[in-house]
Image (tube, rainbow, N blue to C red):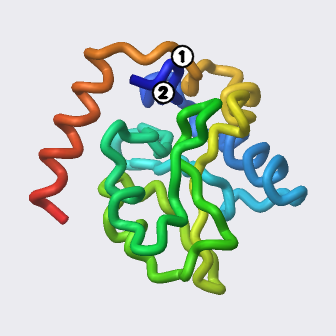
């Protein structure tokens, strides 16, 4: 079981998108929220903002579906990471991810959250505490697994 995981709380998110700004700046050295490794989905009719994050799944489908083993687990952070030099761009990982956490550039390259080497910038920039990097509990991981299992039939 991962020691720490990224957790989002939609009830605390104000939709400020600071997490997207800082994520893109950290990884790309430019402010480009559309290239952040997480995204804020606005449900304007309900006035709700939902941080969509990579859950670093225990049984990561993106990892198991990669035909060239370009996706592995970081031994330090337990993050599921993509090795760009091994990736062939087949997009099997993006198809396998039920949470939409695998992003695709206009050039067809894939990328996702790597937990910023164990110190997620999105968490640091979230002034409302909608994103936390915290100890994983069995109950939370079981909840995510159940959600993914329900979503599998809808894809």
Q: Residue 22 or 148: which is nearer the viewer? A: 148
Question: What quarter of the picture does the C terminus occupy?
Answer: bottom left
Q: Could you tell which of marks 2 and 1 lies nearer the N-terminus?
A: 2
Checking the image for residue 43, the label placed there is none
| Nearer to me, 109 or 82 | 82
**Marks 2 and 1: CB-CB under 8 Å?**
yes
At 49% from the left edge and 13% from the top edge, which residue is drawn? 135
Q: Is residue 130 left or right of residue 152?
A: right
Residue 23 appears left or right of 132: right
| Residue 87 lies in quadrant | bottom right
> Residue at image x 13%, y 61%?
154
Identify the residue under disc 2: 7
Q: Position of residue 28 (x, y in %)?
A: 83, 59
Mark 2 or 1, closer to the camera: 1
Dot 1 alpha-carbon crowd within 10 angstroms: few under 14, some 14 to 19, many 20 or more: few
Q: Residue at the location (31% across, 43% down)?
A: 59
User: Is 67 located above or below residue 9 in the figure?
Assistant: below
Going 53% across and 81% down the picture, which residue do you hit?
89
Q: Residue furthest bottom?
A: 107
Q: Secondary structure at mark 2?
A: strand
Q: Which mark is residue 134?
A: 1
> In the rendered image, which quarter is residue 33 located in?
bottom right
Separation (CA) of disc 2 from disc 1:
7 Å
Residue 94: x %, y % from top left: 41, 68
Residue 76, x across and y down, in percent = 64, 31
Q: Secondary structure at mark 1?
A: strand
Residue found at the far right of this picture = 29
Please state the total of marks drawn on the protein image. 2
Name the spot of residue 23 as percent of width and height, x first: 73, 46
In the image, 27 versus 50, the foreground residue is: 27
Q: In this picture, is 79 found above or below 36?
A: above
């Amino acid at each position: 079981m991962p020691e720490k995981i990224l957790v989002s709380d939609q009830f605390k998110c104000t939709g400020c998108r600071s997490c997207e700004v800082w994520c893109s700046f950290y990884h790309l050295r430019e402010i480009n929220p559309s290239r952040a490794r997480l995204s804020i989905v606005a449900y304007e009719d309900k006035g709700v903002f939902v941080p969509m994050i990579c859950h670093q799944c225990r049984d990561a489908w993106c990892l198991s579906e990669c035909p060239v083993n370009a996706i592995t687990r970081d031994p330090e952070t337990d993050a599921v990471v993509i090795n760009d030099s091994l990736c062939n761009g087949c997009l099997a990982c993006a198809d396998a991810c039920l949470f939409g956490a695998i992003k695709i550039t206009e050039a067809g390259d894939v990328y996702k959250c790597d937990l910023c080497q164990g110190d997620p910038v999105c968490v640091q920039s979230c002034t409302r505490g909608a994103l936390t990097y915290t100890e994983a509990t069995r109950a939370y991981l079981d909840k995510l697994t159940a959600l993914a299992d329900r979503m599998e039939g809808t894809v």
